[in-house]
Image (cartoon, grey):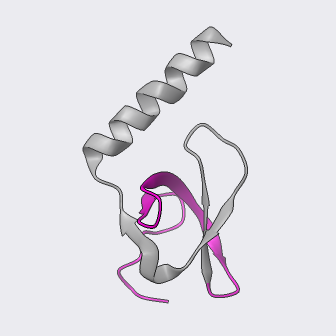
Amino acid sequence: MSADLPLVGAYAVDTRTGTVGQVMGREGGYVQLRPPGGGREWNCPPDAVAHAPHEVLRARVREANRRGRLG
């Protein structure tokens, strides 16, 4: 794995879809990501993982918080 990949617990972007996820681990040559508000993990090839820009992360967290208050 590349040394410049986000660490476990950090947020990253799956560049194939633009989806933000929290890095949960690395398994079988893939990076495992989970949506910020929780949910099902997905596998992402390391070359499609990028550090999450702060603006994207803030927007996703706001949305997750909003859903939490409505649910």
Measured as percent of width and height from the top left, residue 35 is found at: 59, 47
Q: Is residue 55 left or right of residue 52?
A: left
Residue at 33% across, 43% down = 56
Q: Is residue 43 above or below residue 65?
A: below
Q: Is residue 37 left or right of residue 59?
A: right
Q: Quadrant of the C terminus?
A: top right
Q: Is residue 71 left or right of residue 61?
A: right
Residue, far front:
17
Q: Residue at x 70, y 44 (%)?
A: 39
Kindly identify the residue that appears in the image at 43 percent across and 60 percent down. Answer: 12
Q: Residue 20, position in %: x, y?
A: 46, 51
Picture coordinates of residue 65, whole percent (x, y)? 51, 23
- 36 lies above or below 71: below
In this rendering, the answer to whether 48 lies above or below 16 is below
In front: 47, or 10? Answer: 47
- Side of 49 relative to 24 (left or right): left
Query: Quick check: is 25 in the magenta stretch?
Result: yes
**Residue that extends furthest to the top in the rendered view of this protein:** 70
Quarter of the image for residue 3 reads: bottom left
The range drawn in magenta is: 1-29
Count the numbered circles shown: 0
Residue sitting at x 61%, y 80% = 30
Indicate whether residue 68 is drawn in magenta: no
**Image location of residue 5, percent across then percent down:** 41, 76
